[in-house]
Image (cartoon, rainbow, N blue to C red):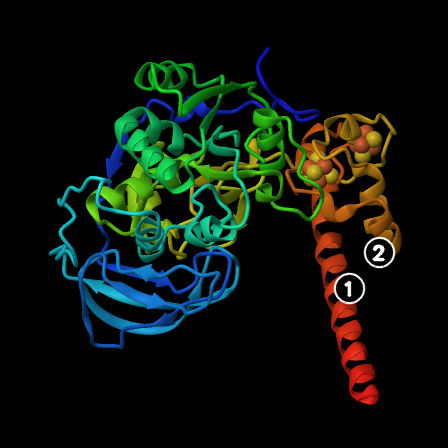
């Protein structure tokens, strides 16, 4: 039996729209907008000034914070401006705007090839940090920080998330099909860092990937290809760890606390590029898809190219899009403008016409229980949504709202098309804010008590 988790859903995956589109490397645009924060953690400070000449792959931003990752120029050219610019997160983010001279002057020698032999664990982690590598599956957590956070923990399961369970997206699929030996080399780097077995977990709708990788690793006991049942959200952190190891990550805990670490397939490829070629993360593969674009594609795109630029390369819109999403339809971020840049966490640009947008209409609940059966976190989405509407934050805490992974499975399964994940997401933000304020008050109270006592 294929490994999986309890609950979940089977949305139509629409991967047929782009799965046969081989990766095409896009030319860099005349101008790139590179945000100084493209990751979870502290934003970077600029290392360049207006008027500076920068090379492709040159570090242009960095931070001393533990949770952060440097930012690199994706072109060679002149820094035009450093200013807040609109971002896929929906807010303005300090960004370096660079005019491309189209010479692609490299900062390093990216045709350089290296072997692992002379690099110890510390050096590998340092190189991963210097490359600005973050989780490319969407979360954007700095990879070197993730590795260092596991220093005190015994890691039994290094899990490669090759599930790509979000509908429409095929960027990881294409990368795995077109660069299998590079990805296997990336896995060998990870093996050297962790000295633990690697579980390469792939949904069984990618049978060609499973067959190819099984063939490549035949005879190796340090890498296991794990076929998973195709089910959404199979690539969710908790669902993946459970499917592969049978271990349950408690609410508020990290995979490392149950002896597991997860890396996305695209992240593994970025590690390969840095360790074997010394190429930092300044471009990535994205899927451009949906029924509103003239043609779909998998592009290798320079970070900082705008959505407008990329969509134009697909021939533009054939029909007015009703919705544009960065990422997939279940967990992606809806965008309200297209002059925003592709960032490290842009896995795809999904452009949907009105007929493809499943609009919630918030009808009444018929108590069918479908959302409860489908919730992969064993929550009661209908109850959470009801208390969210009532703004009853105590009851939301009681019903464990903070365990929600915002996967959207409940909304997908609801026959009444209720605003479930939307209500729950908003309420989660409020509960988080209440928790933070409470913690601050408790800290201030404790400090005042200690001061009084001394
Ligand atoms: S309640 Fe949260 S975790 Fe459960 S299905 Fe809905 S969005 Fe997913
Ligand atoms: S799936 Fe929708 S209608 Fe059914 S119980 Fe959940 S909220 Fe109610």
Q: Could you tell me if residue 361 is visible in this image?
A: no
Residue 404, percent across and down?
Answer: 71, 43
Instruction: Work out how far the residue at label 2 is from the one at label 1, CA to CA, in angstroms.
Output: 9 Å
Q: Which class describes the residues within 10 Å of circle 1: few (<14), some (14-19), or many (20+)?
A: few
Q: Quadrant of residue 298?
A: top left
Viewer-proximal residue among 444 and 135: 444
Q: Say if 183 sits above or below 83 in the image.
A: above
Residue 199, percent across and down?
Answer: 47, 27
Query: Which mark is on residue 454?
Result: none
Image quadrant containing the N terminus: top right
Say which element carries label 2.
helix
Q: Residue at x 56, y 25 (%)?
A: 244
Viewer-proximal residue among 165 and 290: 165
What residue did someone put label 2 on? 393
Residue 183, percent across and down?
Answer: 32, 32
Q: Residue at x 56, y 22 (%)?
A: 12
Q: Could you tell which of marks 2 and 1 lies nearer the N-terminus? A: 2
Q: Quadrant of residue 104?
A: bottom left
Residue 243, percent across and down?
Answer: 60, 25
Query: Which mark is on residue 434?
Result: 1
Q: Is the C-beta of the residue carrying label 1 under 8 Å from the nearest atom of ligand 1?
A: no
Q: Could you tell me if residue 38 is visible in this image?
A: yes
Residue occupying the far top of the picture: 1
Q: Quadrant of ligand 2?
A: top right
């Amino acid at each position: 039996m294929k490994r999986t988790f309890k609950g979940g859903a089977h949305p139509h995956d629409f991967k047929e729209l782009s799965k046969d589109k081989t990766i095409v490397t896009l030319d860099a645009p005349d101008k790139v907008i590179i945000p100084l924060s493209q990751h979870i953690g502290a934003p970077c400070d600029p290392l360049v000034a207006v008027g500076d000449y920068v090379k492709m792959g040159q570090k242009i931003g960095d931070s001393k914070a533990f949770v952060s990752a440097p930012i690199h120029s994706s072109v060679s050219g002149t820094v035009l401006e450093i200013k807040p610019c609109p971002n896929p997160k929906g807010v303005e983010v300090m960004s370096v705007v660079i005019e491309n001279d189209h010479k692609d002057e490299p900062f390093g020698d990216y045709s350089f090839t290296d072997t692992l032999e002379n690099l110890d664990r510390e050096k590998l982690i340092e190189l991963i940090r210097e490359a600005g590598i973050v989780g490319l599956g969407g979360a954007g957590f700095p990879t070197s920080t993730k590795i260092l956070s596991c220093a005190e923990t015994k890691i039994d399961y290094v899990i490669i998330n090759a599930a790509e369970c979000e509908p429409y997206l095929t960027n990881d699929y294409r990368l795995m099909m077109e660069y299998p030996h590079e990805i296997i080399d990336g896995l060998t780097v990870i093996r050297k860092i962790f000295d633990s077995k690697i579980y390469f977990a792939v949904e069984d709708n990618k049978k060609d990937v499973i067959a190819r990788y099984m063939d490549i690793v035949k005879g190796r006991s340090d890498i296991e290809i794990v076929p998973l049942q195709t089910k959404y959200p199979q690539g969710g952190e908790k669902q993946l760890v459970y499917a592969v190891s049978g271990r349950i990550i408690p609410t508020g805990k990290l995979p490392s606390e149950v002896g597991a670490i997860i890396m996305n397939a695209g992240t593994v490829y970025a590690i390969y590029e840095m360790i074997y070629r010394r190429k930092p993360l300044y471009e990535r593969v994205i899927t451009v898809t949906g029924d509103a674009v003239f043609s779909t594609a998998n592009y290798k795109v320079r970070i900082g190219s705008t959505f407008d630029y990329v969509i134009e390369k697909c021939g533009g819109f054939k029909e007015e899009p009703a919705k544009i999403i960065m990422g997939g339809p279940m967990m992606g971020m809806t965008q309200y403008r297209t002059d925003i840049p592709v960032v490290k966490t842009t896995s795809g640009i999904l452009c949907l016409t009105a007929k493809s947008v499943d609009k919630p209409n918030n009808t009444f609940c018929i108590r069918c229980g479908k959302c409860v059966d489908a919730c992969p976190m064993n929550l009661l989405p209908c109850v959470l949504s009801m208390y969210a509407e009532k703004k009853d934050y105590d009851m939301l805490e009681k019903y464990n709202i903070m365990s929600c992974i915002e996967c959207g499975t409940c909304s997908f399964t609801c026959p009444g098309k209720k605003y479930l994940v939307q209500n729950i997401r908003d309420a989660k933000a409020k509960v988080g804010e209440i928790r933070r304020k409470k913690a601050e008050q408790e800290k201030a109270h404790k400090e005042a008590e200690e001061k009084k006592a001394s």
